[in-house]
Image: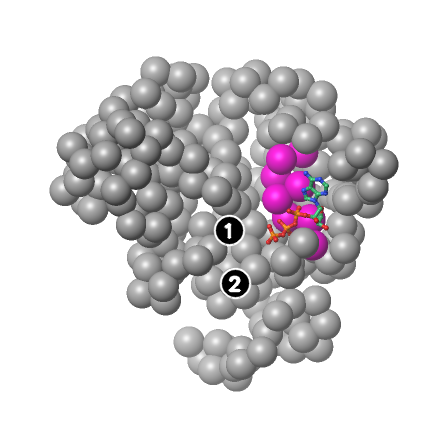
């Protein structure tokens, strides 16, 4: 569904991504794992056309999207959930969602307010509350819900657990899995390894702008040395993860 081939992205004269390649197939949840500053956000921004790579190829459903403007990429069915939770703080939850549906590409998933509220009962309860008054976790949910209202077939989710309390991390994980069950394909950037291993089937590890590992979650769990080398795994209990 999504094919990224050897993209090289720069901020000014400093090169951030070095020949990054990855693939996401229809219906998959794929993790993009890496420490702070590894290049996860830059990879997602490059796919969305927000930061244009200098070299490489990106195709979506067989069509070249490299160098296309972001609104065209979004119209083709790719949704982006940025790390910094972009919502309209002075609009109600309902208005935030209605506004997002106006820019919908009319994709195949048929997301409407009622269906979004079924998936996000917390947002339904706060429908008439201003977005800015929601808690961090609720704002994260609203950001994800807004993206769904655009009816994407693939969503790029950037560190959804950033700054959330452990209980909410679990809620967001359930939500991601529920969204995947609707048939939406997901590329999930994370530095929370536990979250990523529980949410994805296949992962890429990025370090200093280069993909260092690609494989199934099962293989990665068996490969403690790779996790220690490239990820912040302090206190991570590999043996326990295996039995979970
Ligand atoms: P984080 O978890 O901290 O968001 P990340 O893996 O998403 O990390 P990126 O945000 O892609 O990493 O950043 C990769 C590198 O690019 C970092 O060294 C960062 O300092 C640098 N960088 C990011 N944005 C810019 C920018 N606008 N201008 C210059 N350098 C940038």
Q: Position of residue 43 (x, y in %)?
A: 66, 41
Q: Are marks 1 and 2 in contact (CB under 8 Å)?
A: yes
Secondary-structure class at tag 2:
loop
Give the residue displayed 54% in from the left and 18% down from the top: 71
Q: Quadrant of the N terminus?
A: top right
Q: Position of residue 219 (x, y in %)?
A: 63, 68
Q: Quadrant of residue 126?
A: top left
Q: In the image, is 205 to the left or to the right of 107?
A: right
The image's colour scheme reads one colour
Separation of marks 1 and 2 at Cα, in angstroms: 8 Å
Sooner in the amino-acid sequence: mark 1 or mark 2: 1
The region drawn magenta spans: 38-46
Q: Magenta segment: does it hold 45?
A: yes
Give the residue displayed 85% in from the left and 36% down from the top: 13
Identify residue for label 1. 159
Q: Quadrant of the C terminus?
A: bottom left
Identify residue for label 2. 192
Q: In the image, is 189 to the left or to the right of 56?
A: left
Between 99 and 32, the one nearer to me in the picture? 99
Mark 1 burial class by Cα count in 10 Å: few <14, some 14-19, many 20+: many
User: How many labels were placed on the picture?
Assistant: 2
Q: Position of residue 145 (x, y in %)?
A: 33, 36
């Amino acid at each position: 569904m999504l094919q990224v081939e050897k993209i090289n992205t720069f901020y000014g004269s400093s090169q951030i991504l070095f020949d990054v390649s990855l693939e996401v197939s229809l219906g998959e949840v794929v993790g993009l794992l890496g420490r702070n500053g590894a290049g996860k956000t830059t990879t997602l921004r490059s796919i969305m056309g927000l930061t244009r790579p200098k070299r490489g190829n990106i195709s979506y459903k067989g069509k070249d999207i490299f160098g296309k403007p972001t609104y065209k990429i979004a119209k083709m069915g790719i949704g982006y959930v940025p790390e910094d939770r972009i919502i309209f703080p002075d609009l109600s939850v309902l208005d935030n969602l209605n506004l997002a549906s106006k820019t919908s590409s009319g994709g195949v998933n048929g997301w409407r307010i009622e269906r979004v509220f079924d998936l996000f009962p917390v947002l339904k309860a706060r429908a008439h509350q201003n977005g800015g008054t929601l808690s961090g976790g609720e704002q994260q949910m609203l950001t994800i819900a807004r993206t769904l209202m655009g009816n994407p077939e693939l969503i790029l989710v950037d560190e959804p657990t950033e700054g959330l309390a452990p209980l909410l991390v679990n809620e967001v994980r359930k939500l991601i899995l529920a969204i995947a069950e609707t048939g939406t394909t997901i590329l999930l950037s994370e530095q929370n390894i536990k979250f990523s291993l529980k949410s994805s089937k296949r992962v890429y590890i990025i370090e200093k702008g280069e993909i260092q590992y690609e494989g199934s979650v099962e293989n990665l769990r068996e490969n403690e040395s790779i996790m220690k080398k490239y990820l912040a795994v302090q206190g991570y209990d590999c043996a326990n993860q295996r039995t979970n």
